[in-house]
Amino acid sequence: MSDIADLRRDYARESLDETEVRANPIEQFDFWFKQALAAELPEANAMTLSTVSATGRPTGRIVLIKGYDQRGFVFYTNYNSRKGHEIDANPFASLLFFWVGLERQVRIDGRIERIAIAESDAYFASRPLGSRIGAWASPQSQVIPGRQWIEHAVAEVTERFAPQGEAVPRPAHWGGYRVAPEAVEFWQGRPSRLHDRIRYTRNPGAEVTGQQAWRIERLAP
């Protein structure tokens, strides 16, 4: 059996230069994200969401991005889940995309808040019926006695909404969050661990002062 310390891979696919990136991190993300989709990477829309509890303990988990624009990056979940409670206690989060096939990472740090109710309603209505029923049935992050319990809960919810066909409404405890970026880092793997790291940092009050909205800097690998 090989020693885990000997596991390594040298990255040499591409480079990233601060003089060539887009002036706006959302535009740069859009460029990279579309390349990840075009490369048919598995779960290119998967990202690690890290939150921090009221006592300062961090937690990370994988969620799926469901939209992005100049306002930020959107995902959906149960408001009563562990992540939901941590967001209530500390409204800041970090997102991380890792596209190993392109030897790239993107890290997004910023304030997080719930999106408009109408946006959550519209997305929920677009979900498969089974996913909508699951949102009602699952008390996400709570301890349950076993798999049979959740299967029974799904059966009960299915029967409850059966008269409505597929018209299952969004439960009040489920909806979307948006991470409004304050800093976005683009990481491109390079040989000998001398990776390219380009960070965008928002300039507060740029609209008033006439500065560029984002400051672009290179970080040491």
Image (spheres, rainbow, N blue to C red):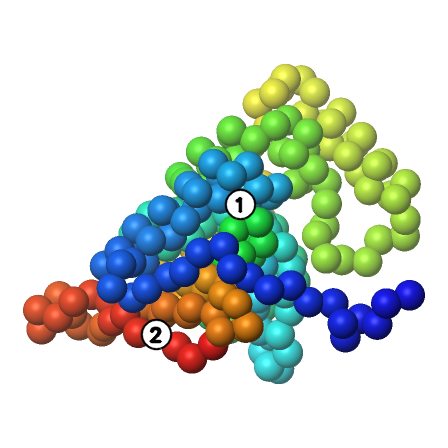
Q: Position of residue 51 (x, y in %)?
A: 56, 68
Q: CA distance from mark 1 to mark 2?
A: 26 Å
Q: Is residue 188 left or right of residue 171?
A: left
Q: Which residue is mark 1?
A: 45
Residue visible at 32% across and 64% down? 17
Callout 2 environment at 10 Å: few (<14), some (14 to 19), or many (20+)?
Answer: some
In the rendered view, would you say 133 is above or below 166?
Answer: below
Q: Secondary structure at mark 1?
A: loop
The amino acid type of the residue labelled 2 equals Arg
Which label belongs to residue 218?
A: 2
Q: Position of residue 219 (x, y in %)?
A: 39, 77
Which label belongs to residue 117?
A: none
In this view, the mark in front (1 or 2): 2
Residue visible at 45% across and 50% down? 74
Q: Is residue 103 left or right of residue 116?
A: right
Q: Secondary structure at mark 2?
A: strand
In the rendered view, would you say 53 is above or below 154?
Answer: below
The answer to which image quadrant residue 214 occupies is bottom left
| Image quadrant containing the N terminus | bottom right
Residue 167 in view: yes
Residue visible at 64% across and 26% down? 129
Q: Residue furthest bottom?
A: 55
Q: Position of residue 210 (x, y in %)?
A: 8, 69
208, 102: nearer the viewer: 102
N-terminal of the pair, mark 1 or mark 2, is: 1
